[in-house]
Image (spheres, grey):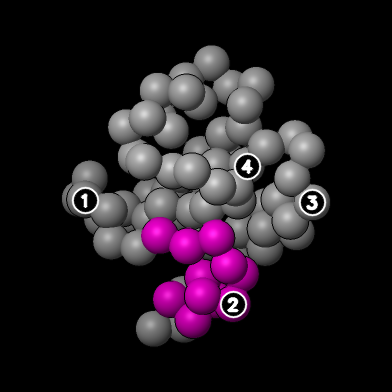
Amino acid sequence: MTYLLFTTTTCPKCPAFKEFVAENIDFNGEILDETSPDFSSHIAESGVTVAPVILIFEDDKEIFRTGEILELQNFLKA
């Protein structure tokens, strides 16, 4: 599995979400914010409209998406 985490530098929920991901996800991923060079293309490609939001992929197919820590926590437990 891999993930993409979309955040912004002004989002009040993003720091806690990034911290949760860093402490609880043990597979490879990337954290992008509006200062990242490919942020806009990834946003357009994935249809993301809010931050934070994490997309989790398996075999290059999206299998999970959320912007809530509790939902992510439940997914990781399953």
Which is more foreground, mark 4 or mark 1? Answer: 4
Q: Which residue is mark 3?
A: 12
Q: Which residue is mark 1?
A: 61
Q: Magenta part mainly helix, strand or loop?
A: helix
Is residue 71 on the magenta stretch? yes
First-in-chain label (1 vs 2): 1
Question: Left or right of 19: which side holds 36?
Answer: left
Where's residue 26, x and y in %? 51, 60
Q: Which mark is residue 7?
A: 4
Is residue 13 on the magenta stretch? no
Judged from the image, the secondary structure of the residue bearing numbered disc 4 is: loop
Q: Residue furthest top?
A: 37
Which is more foreground, mark 1 or mark 3? Answer: 3
First-in-chain label (4 vs 1): 4
Q: Residue at x 55, y 42 (%)?
A: 6
As measured in the structure, the alpha-carbon distance from the residue carrying label 3 to the one carrying label 4 is 10 Å
Which is more foreground, mark 3 or mark 2? Answer: 3
Q: Which mark is residue 70?
A: 2
Q: Amino acid at mark 3?
A: Pro
Where's residue 78, x and y in %? 39, 83
Which image quadrant for residue 63? bottom left
Q: Amino acid at mark 4?
A: Thr
Q: Nearer the viewer, residue 69 or 58?
A: 69
Where's residue 72, x and y in %? 51, 70
As measured in the structure, the alpha-carbon distance from the residue carrying label 1 to the one carrying label 2 is 22 Å
Q: Amino acid at mark 2?
A: Leu
Q: Residue at x 40, y 60 (%)?
A: 65
Question: Left or right of 20: which side holds 10?
Answer: right
Q: Nearer the viewer, residue 3 or 9?
A: 9
Judged from the image, the secondary structure of the residue bearing numbered disc 2 is: helix
Q: Which mark is residue 49?
A: none
